[in-house]
Image (tube, rainbow, N blue to C red):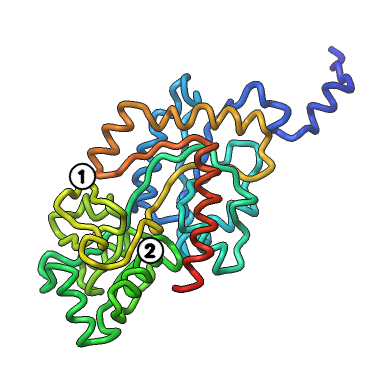
Amino acid sequence: MKRLFTPLIAMLAIAPIGAANADAFPDRPISVTVAYSPGGATDFQARIVTMVAAKEEYLGQPVVIINKPGAGGKVGWNHFASKAKTNGYEMAAYNVPHFIAQSIKFKTKYNIDNLEPVGNWGADPAVFVVSKDSPYNTMADVVKFSKANPGKLTVSGAGLYVGHHIAFLQVQKGTGVEMKYVPHKGGAPALKSVLGGQVMAGINNLSDAYRSRDSLKILGVADLKRDTDFLPGVPTFKEQGYDVDDSSVNFRGIMVRKGTPKEVVDFLSARIPEMFKNKRVAKQMKNGGSPVRVLDRTQVMEMWKARQVVLSELLKDL
């Protein structure tokens, strides 16, 4: 039988995948790149918030998590911003202030102008932690030691100019003491170094610290108010007299590359925030000590722009 090959078929054959199949999107599994190690807060939460993706009311296809850790997220985000396809089938988890601060301080392939958010699932404050057998029971104890021993207190974090590092710089400035920051490849290895005694303290995500709370002492929260859901007994730094605000709070969500077809972005933006609100997802996030803050695409774009301004100013002085 002779194959029919019309100009229209020829046009569809060479059209970009996203444009040609926009009405059928998605018709196969979708990947989400996580720029941090397996087991850390972003990885842990990304797997929870996407676990119902295959339901027809959400994406109708499963989501596969791909970890590309390194350099506090730079390895994964540089790869995503330069290599990922713009057809909606390759998405990535974002962390703010991380990728914004890094794009300000370093020469990166990513910034708020070449990435497109589709929804935010949470906002995770940074906390200051020490191991359970540490001699420090309060931030005042930490400050007292650091005043007597400048630069001796080692503090782990998930990389350079991520939320942990920004919180560290603010804590150091707010307390007026010198400490030593030790960057790691992600929150999970950073926390392990506290638990294993390789460092004397750490700044980590509230959610990671909460899940390891039986092995830690959590001394302060880098936010404007206490977390009443998970750590009601832990004071903020401001409550303790140290000028540390909420600039390091870790907003997490999902994004695509600029150039993704509008109809695909619109589809994802309509479905993904609703997926984050799923009752099963909410229950699992609460069980994991993970604060939820769902924002739609418009709200995330506004948050990105606002954080760009705040961080540009903040990082001049840190």
What's the CA distance linking mark 2 and mark 1?
A: 25 Å
Q: Which mark is residue 158?
A: 2
Label 1 belongs to which residue? 228
> Looking at the image, which is closer to me, 261 or 228?
228
Where, by quadrant of the figure, is residue 134 drawn? bottom left
Q: Position of residue 75 (x, y in %)?
A: 53, 61
Q: Which mark is residue 183?
A: none
Q: Amino acid at mark 2?
A: Ala
Query: In percent of the image, x 61 and y 52: which residue is there?
Result: 81
Q: Position of residue 219 (x, y in %)?
A: 19, 63
User: Relative to 132, is 260 on the left or the right?
Assistant: right
User: Relative to 73, is 179 on the left or the right?
Assistant: left
Q: Amino acid at mark 1?
A: Thr
Query: In percent of the image, x 36 and y 63: which residue is there?
Result: 164
Question: Which residue lies most toward the right here?
Answer: 7
* Image quadrant in which the C terminus is located: bottom left
User: Relative to 159, is 171 on the left or the right?
Assistant: left
* Within-10-Å neighbours for mark 2: few <14, some 14–19, many 20+: many
User: Relative to 171, is 300 on the left or the right?
Assistant: right
* Image quadrant in which the N terminus is located: top right
Q: Position of residue 269 (x, y in %)?
A: 54, 32
**Viewer-side label of 2, 1:** 1
Query: In percent of the image, x 47 and y 54: which residue is there?
Result: 35
